[in-house]
Amino acid sequence: MSKKKLYRSESDRKLAGVCGGIAEYFGIDATIVRVLAIVSIFPLAVIPVLLTYIVLAFVIPNESEVIL
């Protein structure tokens, strides 16, 4: 059984590849993750959502840095 690993996508990235990597991890379309990220900005405050994205961009390794 192979373990799934979370990484930032290098093939499906718009900014840092966080949404693309999350989408690949859960096996869903990246557009859905991006829409959910944008929609979450409106009921929540903009600053926490953006800070979370920035932190994830630094914490989650790049696809080429992960041994698959």
Image (cartoon, rainbow, N blue to C red):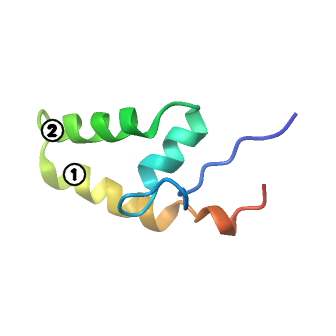
Residue 7: x %, y % from top left: 59, 55
In front of the other: 15 or 37:
15
Q: Which type of secondary structure does the marked residue at label 2 adopt?
A: loop
Quarter residue 51 falls in: bottom left
Q: Residue furthest front?
A: 11
Crowding at label 2, few (<14), some or many (≥20) Cα neighbours within 10 Å? few
Residue 21: x %, y % from top left: 53, 49
Q: Is residue 1 above or below residue 52?
A: above
What's the amino acid at mark 2?
Leu
Q: Residue at x 12, y 45 (%)?
A: 45
Whole-angstrom CA distance, mark 2 to mark 1, is 8 Å
Q: Residue at x 22, y 36 (%)?
A: 40
Answer left or right for 15 relative to 22: left
Q: Residue at x 28, y 36 (%)?
A: 35
In front of the other: 43 or 68:
68
| Labelled pair 2, 1 in contact (Cβ < 8 Å) | yes
Q: Is residue 28 above or below residue 48?
A: above
Quarter of the picture holding the C terminus: bottom right
Answer left or right for 52 relative to 28: left
Q: Which residue is mark 1?
A: 48
Q: Which residue is mark 2?
A: 44
